[in-house]
Image: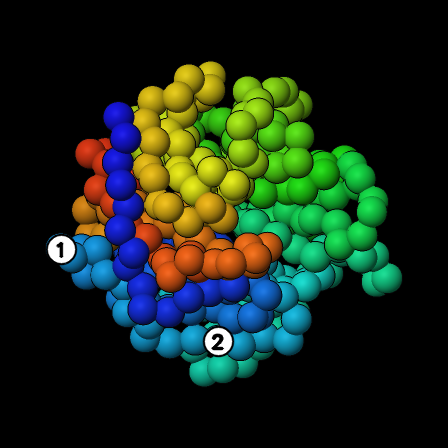
Amino acid sequence: MTFTAVPASADVYELGEGPVWDAGRQRLLWVDIVAGTVYEGRLDAETGRVTVSGRHVFDGTVGAVAVAADGELIVAGQATLIRADAGGSRTELARVLPEGVRSRLNDGAVDPAGRFLIGSLAQDGRHGQEVLARLDRTGLTYLDTDLVLSNGLAWANGRLYSVDTIPGTIWVRDYDPDSGRAGPRREAFTITDGSPDGMCADAGGNLWIANWGLGRVECRTPAGELLDVVETGAPHTSSAAFAGPDLDVLVITTATIGLSDPGPDDGRLFTARVGVRGLPTPYWNPC
């Protein structure tokens, strides 16, 4: 089935990414990577409109954001992970990328037990040296160190799914949230038309993958079968998340970066109702 998303934000973002639904505060979080800004917003579940209610500006890029149960944020800066509390205090938690490496942190997400995972992308000609790392109470663990462009993450069916955008590969590995044990990765499927970007899962275990270049979000089974398409009309569609009190509104981020002549809706947030509900977003556990 094909759905059509509608523009949901008044503002346009250069590189909108990483929508996160904070159910406890009924707010939406997302980032503009290039602007180094985390946004807070209110979602009107009836109209699908999103209104900005706050923003947090950081030095350098901001790849991703997640939230703890008490409202504290974990933010992926250029190369480090940063804790930001409600009072405005900021603390560096961990350096993910070494000094002098021309990479930046990109997409991230929280696993079902509250650990934060984050990937990276190169900003020079290096190929196959990017990471997928996980932060928990024991420190950093690197799950992958040979990616080209680490991107969307989703947990479904007892497995972790992760995107490597440039080769178009969706990887899968068994994942035990209680112990944090991650099995060896294997290829779930490859997308050859467009570039897979951000990703989320629905309550039925299917994957909703933003397709950068085709201006749409694709719903696929864990084996890669295409079930549904959500058209945005914005070529650089970057990520998606289920939001709202009933987790039945798909929020989609888009970008203007790389477009020589952006259209009036490129870079806006979009929303759509697609007939399914998402999974609750786990809170980050900073302990």
Tell me if 83 is positioned left or right of 231 in this view: right
Q: Residue furthest left?
A: 46
Quadrant where the N terminus sits is top left
Who is closer to the viewer here, 218 or 109? 218
- In the structure shown, which secondary structural element does the residue marked by tag 2 occupy? strand
Kindly tell me whether residue 16 is visible in this rendering.
no
Identify residue for label 1. 46
Residue placed at 66% from the left, 36% from the top? 166
Spot occupied by residue 109 in the image (x, y as percentages of width and height):
50, 48
User: What residue appears at the point 60 percent right and 30 percent down from the top-left corner?
Assistant: 168
Question: Which label was assigned to residue 142?
Answer: none
Image coordinates of residue 43 in percent, x first then y, are: 24, 61
List x then y, in percent, for residue 212. Answer: 51, 42
How dense is the environment of label 1, judged by Cα within 10 Å: few (below 14), some, or many (20 and up)?
few
Residue count near mark 2 (Cα–Cα under 10 Å), binned few <14, some 14–19, many ≥20: few
Name the amino acid type tagged 2: His
Closer to the camera: disc 2 or disc 1?
1
| Contact flag, marks 2 and 1 (Cβ < 8 Å) | no
Q: Amino acid at mark 1?
A: Glu
Residue at the farthest front position: 261
Across and down, in percent, residue 150 comes to 64, 42
**Whole-number angstrom distance, CA of label 2 to CA of label 1:** 27 Å
**Visible residue check, residue 118:** yes
Residue 56 has which mark?
2
- Direction from residue 103 to residue 118 in the image, left or right: left
Is residue 153 depicted above or below 234 in this figure? Answer: above
- The residue tagged with tag 1: helix, strand or loop? loop
State whether residue 183 is above or below residue 278.
above
Question: Looking at the image, is mark 2 or mark 1 earlier in the sequence?
Answer: 1
